[in-house]
Image: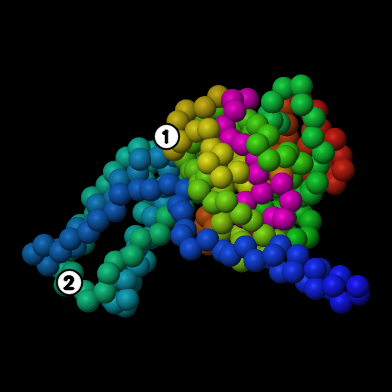
Amino acid sequence: MHRVFIFIFVLINVSCNSTKLPTERFLQYEYFKSYSFENNNLKIELKNPLHCPLRVWLFNDDNALQNRFNQLNPIELNSTSDTLIVLPKVNQTNSDIKFSSRLGSVAKNIDEIKLELPFPNKKEYKIIQGNNTNYTHSTDYSRYAIDFDLKTNDTICSATSGFVVGVVDKYKHGGKGDQWKPYGNYVTIYEPQSGLFTQYVHLVKNGSLVKVGDEVISGQPIALSGKTGQTDIEHLHFNCLIPVNSNDGLKSIPFEFIEGYKSMNLKKNDIVRK
């Protein structure tokens, strides 16, 4: 009997940990980029379809060309705008020009505004992780995030008015390890007057109720909660961010809800009501 118990335990344990990482990566937004060489000129065309500024970096293996790119990087595009860059006396290279982008403008003055709790009226939820805590809230990108114990398919509402600038909702699973971090579903919303971004993370598969380019109002349902990405429990990871020059491009900041709650004061097991 003892051996049978061990066998069953091992079988269950292996089964629970057999979920494989996704083989496909999804981007939260797309933008147009192209380049061509004509008469010893390099022409680079960029188009930003998003309702927020976009910063674009250029990269190439040729050191001389990269030095010229470094004088331009990052190229900042205004909301829904495009640009054509012409670099004279550039010979065609043997390696591709690569592009990288980040949301927002570091030049914009950020205005503090109060946010709405990110769930429907007449609801209350428990805090399961506060700000500046171990595990997932200890980096510049997530330091002041708050985790609410929303269950799978619970409704998530926008904390601000603004525009949807990012959506990922094609992943199905999650896990506790760092390797799961890139595979969470989420929505990103930009509030143009303040310059703030809000993110709503760990959505259920196909759980976005909005698409990139949509205009939303504060309190509007935008997504359904889940447990995709780096998590082993269902919940909503809510974050308020501003643009910075870093690898992530955004930095988490403290915030206050119009319902009277301050993110810096919220702790595990606190109850918040809307």
Label 2 belongs to which residue? 92
Picture coordinates of residue 223, whole percent (x, y): 58, 35
Q: What residue is shown at x 91% (from left), y 74% (from top)? A: 2
Q: Is residue 181 left or right of residue 70?
A: right
Q: Nearer the viewer, residue 268 or 229?
A: 229
Q: On the rendered image, what quadrant is the C terminus found in?
A: top right
Q: What residue is shown at x 48% (from left), y 63% (from top)? A: 23
User: Where on the picture, by quarter, is residue 254?
Assistant: top right
Q: Is residue 76 magenta?
A: no
Q: On the rendered image, what quadrant is the N terminus found in?
A: bottom right
> Please, which residue is most extreme toward the left here?
39
Say if 13 sits above or below 207 in the image: below
Say if 144 sits above or below 2 in the image: above
Say if 78 sits above or below 175 in the image: above
Q: Is residue 232 magenta?
A: yes
Q: Nearer the viewer, mark 2 or mark 1?
A: 1
The local secondary structure at tag 2 comes to: loop
Picture coordinates of residue 59, whole percent (x, y): 35, 67
Q: Is residue 16 left or right of residue 172?
A: right
Q: Earlier in the sequence, mark 2 or mark 1?
A: 2
Q: Which residues are magenta?
A: 218-234
Label 1 belongs to which residue? 213
Picture coordinates of residue 249, whole percent (x, y): 52, 55
Amino acid on which disc 2 is placed: Gln
Amino acid on which disc 1 is placed: Gly
**Residue 146 visible somewhere in the drawing:** no
Q: Nearer the viewer, residue 249 or 176?
A: 176
